Amino acid sequence: MASPFYLFRKYQKAFLVVAGVLAMFIFVVADPLMTWLQSSSGGRRSANTMVTTWDGGSLNLQQLNSLYKRRLNISEFLNGLIMQAATLVEQEGGTPQPPTLPDFRLQDYNPRLVQIGCLNTRMLADMAKKSGISVSDEVVNHYLVEWGLRRMGDAEIGKLLGRVGLSDKALFAGLRELLMGNFYINSYSMAMGGVMPEERWQDWKRINERIAVEAAILPAEKFLSEVPEPSDAELQEFYKLHKDRIDGTQHVVLNRRLPSPEPGFREPRRVKLHYLVGNVDDWATRLSEEVTDTEIADYYERNKDTQFVNTSTSVSAEGLFDDEKDSPEKDEASSADDSFESDATETPSSEDSKAPAGGKAPAEDESGQLPRTSPFRLAAFQEDAETDTEGAEDDSDTAADAAADNDADSEAEDSPDADTSSETENDSPVKYVPLEEVQDQIRREIAKSKAAVEMQKEIRSVYAGLQSTYNPYGFEVVSARTEDREIPAPPASLTDYAEQARKSNLVVESTILLSDQDVFDTNIGKAVDAQSGRNRVVSRVFNDLELFEPLLAKDFVPTQYESILGRDSSWYIACKTEDVASRVPEFDEVREAVLTAWKKQEAGKLALAKAEELAKQATESGATVTTVARDAGYQTITTDMFSWLAFGTTQSNVQLGDAPPLEAIDTDFMKTAFDLEPEQKVALLNHDHTNAYIIQLDRREQPQDELRKQFLAEANSWHGTQTMNSARFGNAKSQIINQLLTQAGLDRDQLEKFFTEEAQ
């Protein structure tokens, strides 16, 4: 037998040449590549950049990036684990039930929120460790078994870990930290979970009490002419106060977005995008001509029993493929990821999600899963149910029915059409919608299916070609940065997609320079990258996407609706062609903007002062708001009935109510309005100070005594109790976490500075 070193000796020179080339490649490229990877994920700052410190601990940029990536992978792993387990339970004929465990899946993939959650978890786990709390491997294993609904073995878990790119060591370390933090914060559950009877009454009333107010509207812009010219010193001071803010930011108040009253003079970071678009409908229109009559007839035959039965309750032929009517609407608010916030108020980390409270532990054969009911009932089961019902009747009922049947039969025999009608009823063939009535809809359906396949195949091919062109250019950029040389110009194919669009039947589009919020307001900005299916394009282009690096993306479609809506979505290949950093302009550059903002703010003060004057006048004279305001030349309205709080798109969350047609009302308005006494008049500004309002109670839907009676009648059965209690629990939990982090010496100023610089 030949020696195993035979091939090495035979091709020794070739091996040495290859080894030499590899050595040079590693020496030249590896260090620049690592530098580039670190810089692209950290705003091109050093990996040792300090994020924040606390008593006995600290976190630098490299550690934060590591925690962030691990957290994303763990969330993806846990989601895949429970979904696979739920599928197994369904295959066994069971109904999945959610496990009574902390849910560590992310609900929002906003990078900043996830990073803050990682920091919170690290600090809480550190406190837990100092308090003597520990989590063993057995506890982590128990969590995995239960989260996998007791259906997932080591082999299945191992495959899933490999799919999401997570090692078992990283999984155990991450879950141990999450569990320790969860155990520690739950040790304060007594302080968080208690709801007093008076609080329950207030919660119920804020949803169920409804009022209408009479209001006068005093627009601040009407007072601009009365604002005196400011001195240069006043403008300079105003500029210094607001120069680091970005104009047009929003506040999130009780889950409702409101425009900020504060101006800003910092220019936001802006990017310009260039992208290709492939839309299924456009491709379907082109491919519909290629659909043959044979394909249409085959589709009809295969689906006529499910789609084309012509009954009295059938939909019309025109509506058989009406996705707009039959498909669930996309819910953007449900995504962690989903909505993009440019200036949101602090919210509790999604890492701290609590397990369902008060739920009964599932039996071993029922563990795990999401409640699910089928809209279908099998005919066989219905017949069995009818048979059982009939068998359960007593003898007297049966005898009575038999007598009635005999009478009915006797009467039927006298009818000449009795036998015929019976035969027709039992033996008539199933009626279908004629093929000629639905062939156009079938053609469109087949064309859409073909278009979805062909378009994705084409756009992926184009993306692969662009990525192949970018890779060597990316290495050139890395080398240039490392050697402090001028960045080379990109290949023409990466800067202009027009030729690619012409060859591939795609549409090419470009944007102007846009801020993060502006990008999110576009279809391409809301899309998600095709690889992860979760990270928004707006997040990628403002975080880790390099200039001219191609990104494959698709319209966001909730996972549960993918089969229904996914075929109608658009696909994109996007690149960032320009990236302008945020900057603070000099005072002289923005003097006019500063003057305008100063006058608007002063005008708001004048509007409020006038509103207070009119409110006092109405109170002293006994006149109504309408009378006094109209005499002064201001518009008056009576609002619709409104409540302080309202349920959102579902009853699982609440948000600040609104009082149409009044604009930008906030919690101060609600408190004032619901505390109004009869005939009382109050003046106040809306949230962004664009309007001053004078409000007076118009009517209450129910008197207080009736509200109390209604509350007592349904206090223990009200459907909103759990939601309101959860909201109180979440608020209390957030407050306790903030207190704990403050006690631990968290350097909040350093943390805020880090994120401010990161955003720039």
Image (cartoon, rainbow, N blue to C red):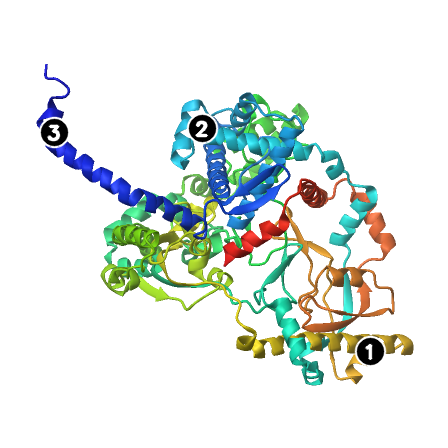
N-terminal of the pair, mark 2 or mark 1, is 2
Judge depth for marks 2 and 3 and give the one in front: 3
Q: Relative to residue 64, is residue 238 depicted above or below? A: below
Q: With 615 as the anchor, is 178 left or right in this view?
A: left
Three-letter residue code for mark 1: Leu
Identify whether 435 is placed above or below 54.
below
Instruction: Tell me how far mark 2 sits from mark 1, CA to CA.
Output: 69 Å
Most foreground residue, 39 or 257: 39
Q: Nearer the viewer, residue 532 or 738?
A: 738
Q: Is residue 183 left or right of residue 466?
A: right
Q: Which numbered disc covers residue 12?
A: 3
Residue 589, image x, y percentages? 53, 76
In the rendered image, the quadrant that contains the N terminus is: top left
Mark 1 is surrounded, within 10 Å at the Cα level, by few (under 14), some (14 to 19) or many (20 or more) other residues, namely many
The dot on residue 504 is none
Closer to the eye: label 2 or 1 = 2
Note whether residue 528 is visible: yes
Q: Amino acid at mark 2?
A: Asp
Q: Position of residue 234 (x, y in %)?
A: 67, 76
Residue identifier under label 1? 614
Q: Are circles 2 and 3 on residues that touch, CB within 8 Å? A: no
Callout 3, which amino acid? Gln
First in sequence, mark 3 or 1: give its number.
Answer: 3
First in sequence, mark 2 or 3: give its number: 3
